[in-house]
Amino acid sequence: MNLVSYSMHDALKSEIDERKDEMLRQLAHCESGGSGPSERPIYGGRGVYLGRFQFSVNTVIGYQRKRDGTQLTGREASELAHDYERAMDLAKYMIFELEEPWHWPLCSRKIGLRDQMAHIKTLSMQAQAR
C-alpha cells in the first residue's frame, strides 16, 4: 500500500468511526434525551431501563458475557449502563458486530438506524477493498 492509498484508507476509517459515533449519539439522544455522560443516573420504563442507551440489566449481563465472557453482577451491569463510554461500546458491539438494532425499536425507526448501518457497512467494505 503506497502512502497516498494508506492516508485515503485512514481517512475512510476515520469517517466510518465518526459516523458510528454520530449514529450512537443520535440513538442515545432519542432514547434518553441526551448523549454523553450524565451527572446523575438515568432511568426509563419505571426504572427498568438504565443509562443513555436505556439498557436493561439483563441485556447488559447477557451481551457483555457474549462479547467477552465477562459475567457481571446486577450492580456491575447497572454501572456499565450508566457509564456512557462503556454503554456506547456495548451498543456498538450489538449494532455493528451482531447487527441487532432491534433492541431500540422506536428509536431505530425514528433515526433510520438500519439505513445508517447499511451506509456504514458499505463504507467499511470499501475500506477493506483498498
Image (tube, grey):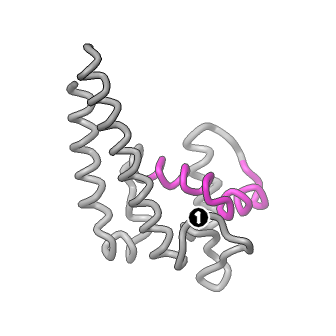
How packed mark 1 is, by other alpha carbons closer than 10 Å (few <14, some 14-19, many 20 or more), is few
Residue 62 spot, x, y in % from top left: 60, 52
Residue pictured at 24% horizontal, 60% vertical:
115
Which residue is outermost to the front? 4
Magenta residues (range):
72-94
Q: Is residue 109 left or right of residue 62?
A: left
Q: Quadrant of the C terminus?
A: top left
Q: Is residue 52 left or right of residue 125?
A: right
Query: Which residue position holds label 1?
Result: 36
Residue pictured at 27% horizontal, 45% vertical:
121
Q: Name the kind of residue labelled 1 in the image.
A: Gly
- 5 drawn magenta: no
Image quadrant of residue 113? bottom left
Which residue is outermost to the top? 1
- 87 drawn magenta: yes
Our reading of the magenta stretch's main secondary structure is helix
Residue pictured at 41% horizontal, 59% vertical:
22
Residue 64 spot, x, y in % from top left: 61, 47
Image quadrant of residue 17? top left
Identify the element where label 1 is drawn.
loop
